[in-house]
Amino acid sequence: MDIDDVRDDITEVLLTEEQIAEKIAELARRIEADYDDDDDVLLVGVLRGAVMVMADLARELRLQLNMDWMAVSSYGSGTQSSGVVRILKDLDTDITGRKVLIVEDIIDSGLTLSWLLANLRSRGAASVEICALLRKPEAVKVEIDVRYVGYDIPNAFVVGYGLDYAERYRNLKSIGVLAPHIYS
Ligand SMILES: O=P(O)(O)OC[C@H]1O[C@H](OP(=O)(O)OP(=O)(O)O)[C@H](O)[C@@H]1O
Ligand SMILES: Nc1nc2[nH]cnc2c(=O)[nH]1
Ligand SMILES: [Mg+2]
């Protein structure tokens, strides 16, 4: 769906389809420079928000890799993190000794990723790095080392390209700022 199809719900288009694709390609080139086929990289997509990033990044990468998924949720249906991270679906892969690259759509409070990093590291992975398409200013407050960041964006609630509000808007091709009248 195009952002114009829900134009009244969006105050501003933040990133177009083209800007997203450009950034995914840039991230892929950086990742390719750091890994090779023998690394047997495991991309771990964080459901559900990271589905679009994962699908596009994985196809853009000229690298032999595996893909797995975890579902964690801390937001429920609102726009504020509840502060409690829950595993809704665990990995199917044993990551002992594996080079893991977590793929995320957005880092906001950083809560989801700092929890996930600790969780995956405790399973004995050889390395755990993070690739996130978007990062908000709040994220600088948490001490997580994010190797690959696409765009640093302003502190607004954004939707589209996997990012939802109450499970809607995930299927927008671009990313926009949600109009306050939708959630207030
Ligand atoms: O840095 P944080 O403040 O923790 O926020 C970022 C997380 O919040 C969103 O997921 P959410 O928990 O809403 O679930 P979803 O991916 O299913 O939309 C988003 O996809 C990130 O995973
Ligand atoms: N859709 C959406 N989910 C988020 N989770 C944390 N921050 C955000 C955001 O800005 N938009
Ligand atoms: Mg998520």
Image: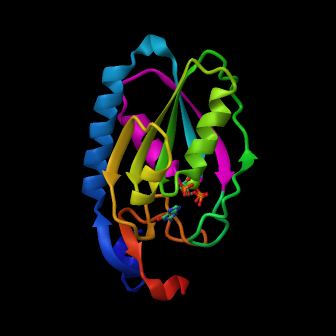
Classify residue 10 by image quadrant.
bottom left
Does the segment drawn in magenta span residue 55? yes
Give the quarter of the image for residue 32. Answer: top left
Measured as percent of width and height from the top left, residue 15 is found at 30, 62
Vertical position of residue 135 compared to residue 8: above or below: above
Tell me where residue 125 appears, x and y as whole percent.
61, 21
Q: Residue at x 32, y 37 (%)?
A: 27
Residue 21 x/y as whole percent? 30, 49
> Which residue does the image show at 41% across and 80% down from the upper left?
6
Q: Is residue 145 left or right of residue 27?
A: right
Of residues 55 and 13, the one drawn nearer to the viewer in this rendering: 13
Residue at 30%, 58% (x, y): give it: 17
Quadrant assignment for the N terminus: bottom left
The structure's colour scheme is rainbow
Which quadrant of the render holds ligand 3?
bottom right
The image shows residue 134 at horizontal and vertical percentages of: 39, 53
- Is 89 left or right of 7, judged from the image as shown? right
Q: Quadrant of the C terminus?
A: bottom right
The magenta-colored residue range is 48-73
Question: Of 57 and 94, which appears nearest the observer?
Answer: 94
Residue drawn at point x = 40 percent, y = 39 percent: 57
Using the rendered view, name the quadrant where residue 91 is placed: top right
